[in-house]
Structures are given as structure tokens and as C-alpha cells.
Image (cartoon, rainbow, N blue to C red):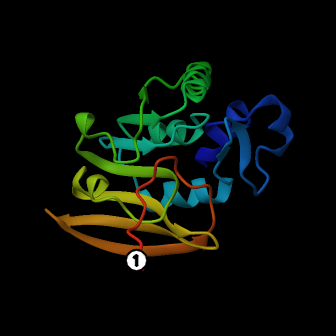
Amino acid sequence: DLLFVVKREDFVPQAYRNLAFADMEIPIGGGQLMLAPKIEAKTLQELSLKKTDKVLEIGTGSGYMAALLAARSEHVVTVESRPELVEMAKQNLERAGVTNVTVELGDGAKGWAQRGPYDAIVVSGSVPVVPDALLKQLRVGGKLAVVVGEAPVMEAQLITCVAPGEFTITTLFETVTTPLINALQPTRFNF
């Protein structure tokens, strides 16, 4: 239902408006893509946000996912590394009347500890491995939604903090999506 309230077409570049709900990632500039609508919807559904939740999004893009998260939570901090996308997101959110989102310019690949801890974290891009820094920024009971792996094998995961330093991992579905800029890379064995 939320997908009809927060209008995705208002967050898509003009040239792609007729494809706003196509089952595809949409280019938004700077080599970046919006997640496909089904991934956004499934992520939001799995988080089961409450109106008292404080949320972190890594990878703001056009601001659409932040707007969806904001409609279900108290406040969203969203971090984007590309200045042109920060400006686009701020304009899109303002035009949509979304007032409970803070858009930050910076590298969120290791989270955004200065505003944490968070009840939920969403990574709007894939990572080969989940950074410990992100896990440490979750409150007990908090959830991290992230796509983990490297093409062609990736899976969406929901990681829940069940106690300090203890987590459960639920695999949601298989997918392939654009990698997060500056994502932590796994250590590789060299001969």
C-alpha cells in the first residue's frame, strides 16, 4: 500500500518516469541505479518498522527508499557519497513533503556511527561481506537489510541483533544488484 502513497515516479529521472514501476533497476546518474521495486518492497516488508524506529540507509540514490522508510519510522538518516545525488535526493524529498529524513554527504560503507545506534539499517547496494561496523551500530532487536555476495551469486539477508554482539541471519531471496561504492572487500588468498 505504501508504494501508492510514496510515488516512485516522483523520484525517478524524467526520462524514466514511464518505467518507474518496471521490474528493473533505473539509472539515476553518476553510474548509480535505483533498486528494483520488488526489492524495495520486500526489504520494507521484512523490516517491520515501527513509528518509533530510528533508521539508517546507506546509499541514498534518488531518496525514494529513504521516503519509504520515513513513512514507517520516526526518523531516517541516509548517507550518500555522490554530491549530485545528495542534491537530487534532498529536492525529491522536499517536493514529496518528507520531513523526517536527514540526508548526509559521506562514505557510509562502514555505517554512520555518529547518529547511531539504529533500530534498522538498509544498505541500498550489495556488499561482498557484511562490515562488522554496521552490525555494531544496531540496537538489540535492530535489523539490518543487506544484499550480500558477488555477481552472479548474491542473496538478500535480514540480520537481527538478538543480544549485544549476537546476530541471527535470515536469507530472504537470491538477487543481483549494483555494488555499494567503497564496500568492504573480503580478504583474498594470495600465492
Is 81 situated above or below 172?
above
Q: Is residue 72 left or right of residue 53?
A: right
**Quarter of image, res 167:** bottom left
Q: Name which residue lies at 34% across and 58% down.
A: 131
Location of residue 93 (image quadrant): top right
Which residue is disc 1 drawn over?
189
Side (left or right) of 24 relative to 50: right
Q: How many marks?
A: 1
Give the quadrant of the C terminus. Answer: bottom left
Tell which of 164 and 97 is nearer to you: 164
**In the visual, does 181 lie left or right of 5?**
left
Q: Residue 101: where, in percent of width, then height?
A: 43, 29
The amino acid on which the numbered mark 1 sits, given as a three-letter code, is Phe
Q: Secondary structure at mark 1?
A: loop
Residue 171 coordinates in the image, percent (x, y):
46, 75
Q: Residue furthest front?
A: 191
Compared across the picture, whether 178 is left or right of 123 comes to right
Decide: is 145 above or below 124.
below
Residue located at (67% from left, 53% from top): 37
Image coordinates of residue 31 in percent, x first then y, are 68, 41
Q: Alpha-carbon neighbours of circle 1 within 10 Å: few (<14), some, or many (≥20)?
A: few
Question: Does residue 120 sit above or below 39 in this rendering?
Answer: above
Q: Is residue 176 or residue 77 the one in the foreground?
A: 176
- Please state the horizontal and vertical placement of residue 182, each as a whole percent of the image: 46, 48
Which one is in front, 127 or 182? 182
Query: Residue at image x 35%, y 36%?
Result: 74
